[in-house]
Amino acid sequence: MPASPTATPEHIKDVNTRYHDAAAHEYDAKWGIDFGDIGQDQVRQKLVKALGGGDGQTFDAALEIGSGTGYFSLNLVQLGLIGKLTATDISPGMLAQLATTAKALGLESVDTVVTEAETLPFEDESFDLVLGHAVLHHIPDLGRAFAEFKRVLRPSGSIVFAGEPSRYGDRLAALPKRGGMLVAPVWRRLVGARGRAVAEVDQSEGHSLEGEVDVHAFAPADLRRLLERAGFDDRRVGGEELLANAWGWGLRTVESSAEPDSVPLRWRRFAFQSYIALQKVDTRLLEPHLPAELFYNLLVSARKPA
């Protein structure tokens, strides 16, 4: 369940910091994050879809909000689409993991800064791009945050956010989660996995906080209004991933019921490859023809006036 409607911004930020610090070390494995060809192709497609085209567009200086372990930004740096990256997050643990990954990938043009999105410690007009993945729904004061994004952008600079949960998609995800819980015992027997001795949610304070870190699920109209009120031009809100996310939540739910080291490699390969296959179906057949409201994730982009 999401954070309580009565939760203060301070409580929300504290919970997000503690949860993401605790989750940082295992985050990439938990969510199947890839920094190779597959991950790079995923983020390239997200950027192109969010911007409504422009494959190959590059940005000299980029600021990422809620960088996490760097899935979105580090893959874009590897592709050469971002020159200098400043990665920010409220969680020092996440940024430490990002810095470790950047070093392992040989990426030198990456800085990390611990900060909140609503009070960015950067000069006006410092960046060509402000981006983020699955972060807006964690921010208590979105109006203030969007004003900051616009302030630090150079004229004609862009914002791009992907992976934001839609209201309908958030409800839709409950179905595969419930289904996954029902079939988990049968799945464990079939693949030869051991049940968790301690449920994931009970393993640490960090896991127990997972249900409190989300603040918003969006209707596309909500995001369009935010962009308009902040004074952005060329406003776009689109949807992505319907089949892939339904399947992915089911996979994540059954896998969370097993001890991680007991899940066979052959299953992990099947799960990953099937998810990628459904992503392609979504991209090619569903996303061009269905309204954004139907998809689990929303893509947001806009441009600061020249």
Image (cartoon, rainbow, N blue to C red):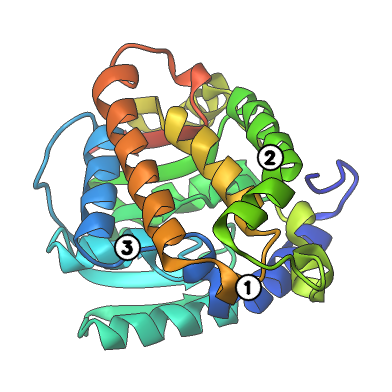
Q: Nearer the viewer, residue 136 or 285?
A: 285
How many discs appear? 3
Position of residue 247 measured from the top left corner of the image (x, y, whole percent): 51, 37
Locate residue 187, reporting x and y percent: 63, 49
Residue 127 shows up from this direction: yes
Going 79% across and 74% down the picture, which residue do you hit? 203
Tag 1 near tag 2, CB within 8 Å: no
Q: Which residue is mark 2?
A: 177
Compared across the picture, whether 216 is left or right of 154 comes to right
Q: Which residue is mark 1?
A: 23
Please state if 18 lies on the left or on the right of 119 as rendered.
Answer: right
Counting other residues with Cα less than 10 Å from the Cα at mark 1, is it few (<14), some (14-19), or many (20 or more)?
some
Query: How many angstroms separate mark 1 from mark 2 (CA)?
Result: 20 Å
Q: Which of marks 2 and 1 precedes in the sequence?
A: 1
Q: Are marks 2 and 3 in contact (CB under 8 Å)?
A: no
Q: What residue sits 67% from the left and 64% below the top?
A: 258
* Front one among 127 and 90: 90
Give the label on residue 73, or none. Answer: 3
Q: Is residue 239 above or below residue 36?
A: above
Q: Nearer the viewer, residue 133 or 64?
A: 133
Q: Is residue 166 above or below residue 125?
A: above
Q: Secondary structure at mark 2?
A: helix
Which residue is outermost to the right? 6
Q: Amino acid at mark 2?
A: Lys
Name the spot of residue 127 as percent of width and height, x first.
Answer: 28, 60
The quarter of the displayed image where residue 152 is located: bottom left
Q: Earlier in the sequence, mark 2 or mark 3?
A: 3
